[in-house]
Image (cartoon, rainbow, N blue to C red):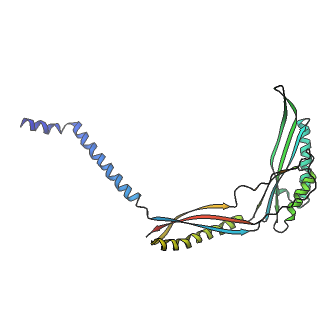
Amino acid sequence: MFENNLKTASWREPKFVLMLVGLLLLAGVVVISILRDRIVNPTMQQVTVNGQGRVAYTPNLAIVTLGMQIDKAKTAEDALNQLNSKMESITKAVKALGVTDSDIQTQNYYLNPQYDYVDNVSTVNGYNANQQLVVKISAYDQDPARLNKVIAAASKAGANQVAGLSFDSSNINDLKQQARIAAIKDAKDKSVALAAAAGVELKDIFSWWENVIQPSPYNTAYPYSYDQGGKGGAAVSPQIGSGSHEVIVEVGVSYNLK
């Protein structure tokens, strides 16, 4: 009887009570985790179908980057004076073809010393200066030859760089929306045939993603420079065409299965 009383008393000690409470709490955490996984992460009964939408368009905007490079001017002041004089002539020539101030933007402007290295000793041998203008040509679809005229006029006025060229549409957001809707319709049409082939039934759409493939977020560049010793290029009119353009959007439409 003494041993039984001793065993009974031992369970009443604080350390045994704490152990028992700990075991109960651990069991509770395990049960809650199991229930949470079953409620929050049910078995996946979903499928995603991809679609693509294409909308062709004719660009009505042309964007060209024109530049002027001055090399080996004797002084920094001389380099900037030459650059400013040339850019003033270039801007005047471009405006004469109907380009407004709001469609001319300076993109790059710098002045750097040029060094010569002789016997591991560097000395300043002149100053280089550069400025680039981004020129937007509107109504390009009505007068494509205007782009060629702008480049030729800028060259004659002193521009010796064409650093980039791209084409765009003033209603590009509307075109993207049309392509987006066409892509979703394409995905929905495909889903009917795919579900029938797989022997499943589709329920509701619970999400979708999209990816704009074209137009690219990067401009199409056509680097070109005239080697005229900083004096500008010849008055030769380039022949540039915009070609065909498309807005392409891909979507993935995710369905719940019945």
Toward the viewer: 188 or 23?
188
Left or right of residue 147: residue 32: left
Quarter of the figure with the N terminus: top left
Toward the viewer: 15 or 35?
35
Tell me what residue is drawn at x 92 percent, y 57 percent.
Answer: 236
Residue 134 pos. (x, y %): 81, 53
Q: Quadrant of residue 149?
A: bottom right
Left or right of residue 44: residue 11: left
Residue 114 pos. (x, y %): 85, 35
Residue 36 pos. (x, y %): 37, 55
Left or right of residue 148: residue 247: left
Tell me what residue is drawn at x 90 percent, y 35 percent.
Answer: 75
Quarter of the figure with the C terminus: bottom left
Tell me what residue is drawn at x 33 percent, y 49 percent.
Answer: 29
Q: Quadrant of residue 165?
A: bottom right
Toward the viewer: 67 or 201?
201
Q: In this figure, what is the number of numbered marks? A: 0
The residue sitting at the left extreme is 1
Residue 157 pos. (x, y %): 93, 52
Tell me what residue is drawn at x 83 percent, y 37 percent.
Answer: 112
Q: Quadrant of residue 142?
A: bottom right
Toward the viewer: 115 or 129?
115
Relative to residue 82, is residue 194 depicted above or below? below
